[in-house]
Amino acid sequence: MASNTSTQNIKNTNTVEDCKIIEIPKIKDPRGNIAVVEKDVIPFETKRVYYLYDVPSDASRGGHAHKNLCQFLIALSGSFDVILHDGKEQKKVTLNKPNKGLLIKPGIWRELENFSSGSVCLVLASEVFEEEDYIRDFNDFTLFKSR
């Protein structure tokens, strides 16, 4: 049980500065480039993959945090902004290159907005879907961060 508490505390202390842009190795070719996300590119094993598309430009996605799950977001096409919040600081990251992704650590609130026409957001997740891992209310999130 003590290790669970210490793991929980580490996740509570993640900040927006712990969320990093990671360059995805690309192979250039006159016929078209290939970007490859393998196990040494992101610091977790991918257990779930999904993507957002046809998002209206005035819509917002996300609006939650995860207690344990890590995510890696890539703008496969177009662009969008990711607003990160750690309970104290806020940071905006614009994703607009298919060979760069954003690593989001556990315990970080995220909102995705300002989607360009035709944008596609690919999400690689460290865990399968579990509703218990989500914090969907910002007040609950600030309580989680203060533990």
Image (cartoon, helix red, strand yellow):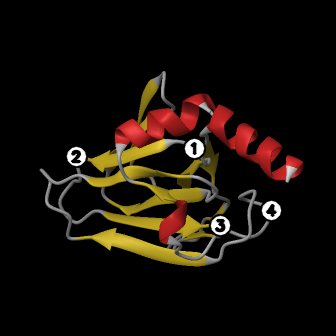
- Looking at the image, tell me whether mark 2 or mark 4 is earlier in sequence order: 4
Name the residue carrying label 3.
Answer: 126
Dot 4: element: loop
What separation in Å lies between label 1 and label 3 (alpha carbons)?
A: 14 Å
Q: Nearer the viewer, residue 87 or 102?
A: 87
Left or right of residue 35: residue 2:
right
- Looking at the image, tell me whether mark 1 or mark 2 is earlier in sequence order: 1
The picture places residue 78, in percent across and down from the top left corner, at 30, 57
Near mark 1 (Cα within 10 A), the count class, few <14, some 14-19 or many ≥20, is many
Q: Amino acid at mark 4?
A: Asp
Name the residue carrying label 4.
Answer: 40
Name the residue carrying label 2.
Answer: 114
The picture places residue 38, in percent across and down from the top left corner, at 73, 70
What separation in Å lies between label 2 and label 3 (alpha carbons)?
A: 25 Å
Residue at image position (72%, 45%) is 8
The picture places residue 61, in percent across and down from the top left corner, at 29, 56
Name the residue carrying label 1.
Answer: 107
- Looking at the image, tell me whether mark 2 or mark 3 is earlier in sequence order: 2
Residue at image position (51%, 32%) is 86
Dot 2: element: loop
Dot 3: element: loop
Q: Amino acid at mark 3?
A: Ser
